[in-house]
Structure formats: C-alpha cells, structure tokens
C-alpha cells in the first residue's frame, strides 16, 4: 500500500525531471554551449566503468533489500503469531491461577501452590515465563535492528533515485552528443562535396590559364613591337631623332660645300697673276 501511494509522486517527479532535462538541453543548444554537454574522452571510459560498478552495486543492494524485507516480514509475522499465542495462553493461565487461588487459599497448601505456580509458569512447548521475557527482549532488539535496516534502506533508496536521475541525464546528454555528431557529419559531407567540386573547378581554370598564357606568348611573338608599347614609342622617338639628325647632316653638307667653294675661290685669288681688287663673294 505504501508503494502504491508513492507511485503518483514518482510519476510526477519523473515528468518534472524529463521536462527540466529537455529545457536544459534546449538552453545549451540555443547558446551553443556544447562544452558543458560534451563528454571528456579522457574520463569517459572511467565514468562508464564507475557507472556499471554503481549499477551492479545497486542491483546487489536492491536484492539484499528485497531479501531483508521478506525476511523481516516473515519474522514479524512469526513473532506476532507467537506473541498472540503467548498472550492467549497467558490469559488462560491467569484465569486458571485466579480460579486455583480462590480454591486453594489455605496456609497448609503453600507447597502445593508453589508447585502449581511453577507449573503455571510453564507454557508448554519448552516455553516458560523467563523464556517469554527473553523472547520479548529479543523481539525488541530485532525491532531496533529493523529500524536501523529501514533507515539504511531509505538511504539506499535515495541513492538509487539519485543514480537514476544521473543516468537519465547521461542518456539525454549522450543523445544530444550523438545528434550533434550526426549534424557535424552531414556538414562535413557537404563540405567535402564542395571541396571536390572546387578542386575540379581549379583544375579546369589551371588548364584554361595555361592555354591563355600559351596563346598570349604566341600572339606576343607574332605581333612584335605592337605588343610592347614602350618599345614602340621608343622606336618612334628614335625615328624622329634620326630624321632630325639626317636633316642636320644634310644641312651641314650643304654648308660644307659652300665653304669649300669659297675656300677655292679665295685660293684662286691668292695665286700670282690673279686679278686683284675683286670683291669676295
């Protein structure tokens, strides 16, 4: 009955825990705080080993709890049954004693009364009043031990609930990490496909660049100076300079011829017998 009464509380507690776990996971997903939820690969094996050890120890404790509870209930039922029988026998014996005391209140019958009292203290089945008192003391001791075991079971139950909550959190955390890894794998596949496409495009562009460079070199070789504006401009300046130089040379030659004619004329004038007084041209 006590467990049935605790079932609604357990269901509400599990629902609240799942709700809080979902909200916590959504919060860390929204802020991208995966570090708080990502397992440390250095300690994950140790954590899993410790988790399995705790689960095994928990199973052992739960088994021991079931055995202790069953044994305690059996012992309680047996002691209660024995106590009822003893109480019933005690009542009967007290009634007999009262009846005998009424009949045997005689000073001369004291020895017989003592004998009867000893017989009355014997409850049968090797059980006497002293044995009953001893059994009662043992019953109180067992009740005290039962309370201690109950307190220990409550502590173990609390620890079990804590471990269950931790395990649920770890499962939620593991699911989130798996979802994150799956999404990252999808993104990685897309990036790899883009990488292959870009690599093929780079190869095509390199081939086009090589072809364009080859065509450019051929056109440059065929066009000569037309492909070199600086040299072409220098060529035009050189032609203009040569043309001016040619004109200067022609002019100097003409001047030289005139000077030669004057020198020849002067030489003729300076010869003996030449007519004097002529004007020099």
Image: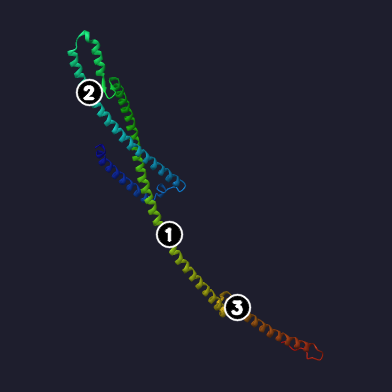
Q: Alpha-carbon neighbours of circle 3 within 10 Å: few (<14), some, or many (≥20)? A: few
Counting labels gives: 3
Q: Nearer the viewer, residue 171 or 64?
A: 64
* Image-based side of 267 in relation to 180, left or right: right
Going 19% across and 14% down the picture, which residue do you hit? 101
Residue 256: x percent and y percent? Answer: 71, 84
Q: Nearer the viewer, mark 2 or mark 1?
A: 2
Whether tag 2 and tag 1 are in contact, CB under 8 A, the answer is no
- Which residue position is annotated with label 2? 89
- Which residue position is annotated with label 3? 235
Give the secondary structure at mark 2.
helix
Q: CA distance from mark 3 to mark 1?
A: 60 Å
Whether tag 3 and tag 1 are in contact, CB under 8 A, the answer is no
Colour setting: rainbow
* Image-based side of 40 in relation to 123, left or right: right
Q: CA distance from mark 2 to mark 1?
A: 86 Å
Q: Which mark is residue 188?
A: 1
Residue 230: x percent and y percent? Answer: 57, 74
Residue that extends furthest to the top in the rendered view of this protein:
107
Residue 83: x percent and y percent? Answer: 25, 26
Q: Nearer the viewer, mark 2 or mark 3?
A: 2
């Amino acid at each position: 009955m006590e467990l049935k009464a605790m079932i609604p509380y357990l269901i509400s507690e599990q629902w609240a825990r799942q709700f809080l776990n979902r909200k916590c996971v959504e919060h860390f997903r929204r802020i991208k705080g995966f570090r708080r939820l990502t397992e440390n690969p250095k300690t994950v094996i140790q954590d899993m080993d410790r988790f399995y050890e705790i689960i095994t120890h928990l199973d052992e404790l739960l088994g021991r709890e079931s055995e202790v509870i069953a044994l305690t209930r059996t012992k309680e039922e047996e002691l209660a049954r024995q106590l009822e029988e003893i109480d019933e026998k005690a009542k009967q014996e007290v009634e007999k004693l009262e009846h005998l005391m009424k009949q045997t209140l005689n000073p001369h019958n004291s020895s017989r009364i003592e004998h009867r009292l000893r017989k009355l203290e014997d409850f049968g089945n090797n059980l006497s009043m002293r044995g009953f008192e001893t059994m009662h003391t043992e019953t109180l001791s067992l009740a005290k031990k039962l309370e201690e075991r109950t307190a220990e079971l409550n502590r173990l139950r609390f620890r079990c609930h804590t471990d269950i909550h931790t395990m649920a959190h770890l499962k939620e955390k593991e699911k989130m990490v798996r979802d994150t890894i799956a999404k990252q794998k999808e993104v990685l596949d897309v990036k790899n496909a883009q990488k292959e496409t870009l690599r093929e495009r780079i190869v095509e562009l390199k081939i086009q660049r090589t072809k364009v460079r080859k065509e450019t070199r051929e056109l440059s070789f065929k066009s000569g100076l037309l492909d070199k504006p600086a040299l072409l401009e220098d060529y035009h300046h050189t032609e203009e300079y040569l043309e001016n130089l040619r004109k200067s040379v022609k002019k100097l030659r003409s001047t030289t011829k005139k000077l030669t004619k004057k020198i020849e004329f002067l030489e003729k004038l300076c010869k003996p017998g030449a007519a004097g007084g002529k004007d020099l041209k």
